[in-house]
Image (tube, rainbow, N blue to C red):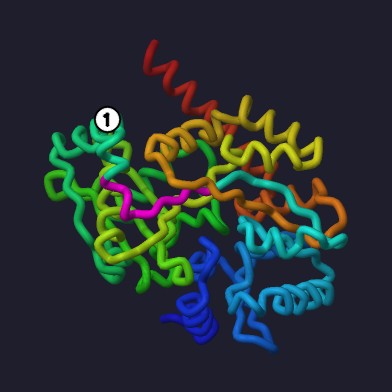
Amino acid sequence: MVNVSTALARELVMSYGWNATSCQILNPGIQHWFSSNAQAVIGYTRRASLIAIAGSPVCAPEQIPEVCEEFEKYARRQRCRVCYVCAEERLHSLFAQSPNHASVALGAQPAWNPEVWPAIVERHASLRAQLNRARNKDVVITHATAAQAAASPELRKVLHEWLAARRLPPMHFLVEPDVLDGVVEDRVVLVATRHGKAVAFLVASPIVAKNGYLVELLARSPSAPNGSSELLIDATMRRFAREGRRYVTLGLVALAHAAAGEIHRNPLWLRTLMRFARVHASRFYNFRGLEQFRVKMAPGAWEPLYAISNERNFSVRTLYNIGGAFSGIPPWLAIGMGIGKAIRRELGGALTGS
């Protein structure tokens, strides 16, 4: 049953949601703060002395400055700093001249107008080939209602298999895999089936103020034929085009080359860490593969995403606590678990091959 806080948060999200992360504040694990002076909600999680905000306040645009100020006063009373994570350009511009805020670029999110999607498919033979691979393997896309999706053991199985195949432990906050355990009634769920069995599914969340959607989750069983993910996205784009939607994004691509100019303005220590991550952390997080998957679908734009903290200089401590918000555990432990999983997988492969 949805509690009163979540119901009110949903009402505000469905009235004012503009940031791509807006609907994600209705996911499990996100706390809600409501303004006493405006119709506004902030979704957040706390790690140590940092409150990590999901994107931006959800409210009327003209109220954003006062809502941010009110929440930051609240955070100070809790002896916490604040960081707006995956903030878009509107909030970045608001704080650009503030001496008490520091911003860093995290990457970028690709965006499409679904009306032009058929033309994109027509122009890109490699994309058509992937779609045809899935169709030739009898993959069919169907729609599931929110209630059906939330109660489906098949979709839970696909999700479990997808998470088990990943290199890091399940992450949370703005990459929460347990979307079906949150408020799903406003979301669109499409399912890829083969011979009547679910092999992949997609969850898209509304961005009301942009007349669009965020593809929030795309889970694929290792048994899904090649092209299943692309076929889900194709069906999603065509559905939204028919509905007159004007915006679709697949969310943050961390360290995306499209944000190279913004990333270059980050502090030297952070740029160094980001370069190291791209080169050496691929066994834990496939930065290059995730970006290439989106690039081949020819997005119409790449929108920079930022982390904005209320401190004069963006600190290592803030970055560490953001990592904790995503991992749900100390980042060093998440990395250690990832290394352990990689070693077990490589040893298992060596034993199998011997």
Q: Is residue 115 magenta?
A: yes
Answer above or below: position of 331 versus 134.
Answer: below
Q: Position of residue 111 (x, y in %)?
A: 46, 51
Answer above or below: position of 3 versus 199.
Answer: below
Could you tell whether 111 is left or right of 118 in the image?
Answer: right
Question: What residue do we see at 69% from left, 88% from top?
Answer: 37
Q: Is residue 137 magenta?
A: no
Q: Name the quarter where the N terminus is drawn.
A: bottom left
Q: Name the quarter where the C terminus is drawn.
A: top left
Q: Is residue 234 visible?
A: yes
Q: Is residue 224 visible?
A: no
Which residue is tagged 1? 125
Toward the viewer: 227 or 50? 227
Identify the magenta region: 109-118
Q: Position of residue 138 (x, y in %)?
A: 13, 40
Q: Amino acid at mark 1?
A: Ala
Q: Position of residue 35 (x, y in %)?
A: 67, 83
Answer above or below: position of 193 versus 89.
Answer: above
Q: Position of residue 50 (x, y in %)?
A: 76, 61
Could you tell whether 169 is left or right of 233 in the image?
Answer: right
Residue at the far top in the pictured view: 354
Question: What residue do we see at 25% from left, 38% from top?
Answer: 122
Question: What residue do we see at 56% from left, 50% from top?
Answer: 303
Circle 1 residues within 10 Å: few <14, some 14–19, many ≥20 = few
Element marked by disc 1: helix
Question: What residue do we see at 24% from left, 31% from top?
Answer: 129
